[in-house]
Structure formats: C-alpha cells, structure tokens
Image (cartoon, coloured by chain):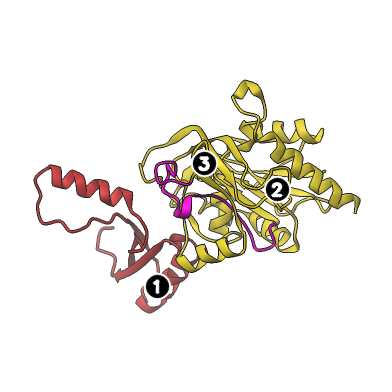
Amino acid sequence: MRARICVSPKPSVLDPQGKAIGRALGALGFRGIREVRQGKLIEIDFEHTDPTEVRLRVEAMCKELLSNPVIEDYSIEIAPTEAGR
Amino acid sequence: MKASVIIFPGSNREPDLCAALERVTGREPDRVWHGEGSLAEDLDLIVLPGGFAYGDYLRVGAMAAHSPIMREVRARADRGTPVLGICNGFQILTETGILPGALLANRTLSFVCRDVYLRVENHQTIFTGSYSPGQILRVPVAHHDGSYNADVPTLDRLEERGLIAFRYCSASGEITDSENFNGSARAIAGIFNERRTVLGLMPHPENAIDPLLGSTDGRPFFEGLFNALSGRIAA
C-alpha cells in the first residue's frame, strides 16, 4: 500500500510562502485567487497490504514526526501501490 | 560551573558559544555528540547551539528533537537543570515540546543576519539577572526561521506569567511592527519554561561579548548565568 500525507500550515498560521506564490500568480495574470497555502507532500510505500494497518501506522508517524500540531494539519490518503513501482 | 554543549550534525555556532562560556566561566564546556545517550551527572547547564541540525529537513529542529540525547535533555530539564537553546537550539526545544510554540519562516522569507535591539521583559531569572528591567540590548540575529508562533491562550499565558524573556524593539525600546522583522507573535524573541529554568531565544548573545564584534551586551548574559549557577552550586 502507498500512503500520501499532505501536511499544510494551519489556517491560523501565517504562510508567507503561500502569499508569495499568490502574488506571483496574480502577476502572471491568473485571476480569481482568494488565497494560496503551501504545504508538503510525503509519500510512503509500505510492504503491508492492509489499509487499516497502514493508516494506523501513518497516523502515529504524523503525530510523532511528520507534522507539528502547533502549526500544521495533515491529511492521509491510502491507495494500493501502482504496478511497476 | 559545568556546562555541556550538544552538537548535532549541522550545528555550526558551537565554537562561538563555547568561546563565550569559556571566557566568562574560565572553564571549557564539554561538547557532547547528539548520538550519546547520557550526560554527566554533575551538570549545571545544557546548551543547544545554533546551526542547521539535519539541514533543517522536514521542519527546523524536527529531526534533532528525536536525537538520542534529547531524551536525556528533556529528563534533565524536567529535573530543573538549566537548559539554554539559542537559534536552532530554540527551534529544537520547541520541537521537543520542552518550550511551547513553534518557529516558522521569517515573514520576509529572507535570511536575516544583522544586529537587532531586544528589550529585557523579565530580568528576575538565572538567565537575565544581570540586566535591569526593560534594558535594551543590541545583539545579532542570523536566521531564516525565527517567527515565533503559538496559539492565543499560550501567548496570553506566556505574557501573564512573565515567561517572555526578550522582545524585538527599536533602539529606544518601542515595540513596533517594523522592528519585528521576522513577524514573531507579540514580537517575541525568547521565552522561558514555566519554572524559568529553560530559555530559548533566536538572537545570539554569544556573538555580542567583545567590542570587536560591535556589541558587548551579550556578556552580562553569560556573566549573570555564571553567577546565578555558581551561587546555586555554593548554596
């Protein structure tokens, strides 16, 4: 199984990188942008095949290391690893 | 006074820190590699220096917070051993949860390396005892991720309990938005733990101990700490 973890700054936290990206997009002529937030994507490929077990492990990883609850939220997607990977 | 300076892969401010400690205390601190599992029993001070531990991977201080030695640092901090974290050391202390909050990228997204002014917010601690109330210091900063952040209840608690050590200010001591160059919540430059035995700060007092470096305002910091800890040892 493969887990994709999206770690993003909490809405209450200032995100200067997101703001800079928003300004750059505006300068390029992209209209209608309300806000840009920048986070990070972490992919983990597991030997395990049970999605429930994988989710439990990833939750623990997020709490211990992958995210900082003071400043970040995270979301987890779990899917079968694609063939050939 | 027996001090240990913890070295992580990517620490780079430890020479200046060790020099400052040695100049003031007359004794060279021990350097302890982060992979060690224990610290000397009779330790009076633990210092986490500046730098870029683990290349700031994932988040500043995140990897270092899980180094083997940090378990011991936390245990000592819980027992009341004074701990000082400067710059990256402050970031590591927040990531470990020894101090509340977190440090984020400066609001300008640039690395700022220059002298700034600090106002002493609480002078009744082992770290700040040689300063007068509200004294203005000129001390250098050198960081990219120094924007202190915490939720409002935490910030209120820090304020109410006198746990803010230093704030960024103007040369005359005013707290203004423009002097708060990194965008820290309430212009916070450094905080104490509840018992005021742990201090984390972004500026570098160890780089303000010699007239050659433009300021000697950091020297009383180390002298005061040395006096407080020597008194503690004698008592």
Label 2: which residue?
Answer: B127
Residue visible at 42% across and 36% down in the picture: B111
Chain (red):
A
**Quadrant, the N terminus of chain A:** bottom left
Helix, strand or loop for disc 2: loop
* Position of B157 relative to B143 (above/below): below
Report x, y in % for residue B2: 81, 44
Residue visible at 65% across and 63% down in the picture: B194
What chain letter is assigned to the residue under label 2? B
Label 1: which residue?
Answer: A54
What secondary structure do most residues of the magenta stretch adopt? loop
Q: Which residue occupies the foreground of this view, B217 or B225?
A: B217
The nearer-to-camera label among 2 and 3 is 2
Helix, strand or loop for disc 3: loop
Q: What kind of residue is marked 3?
A: Phe
What chain letter is assigned to the residue under label 3? B
Q: Which residue occupies the foreground of this view, A51 or B214?
A: B214
Whole-number angstrom distance, CA of label 2 to CA of label 3 = 24 Å
Label 3: which residue?
Answer: B52
* Chain B representation colour: yellow
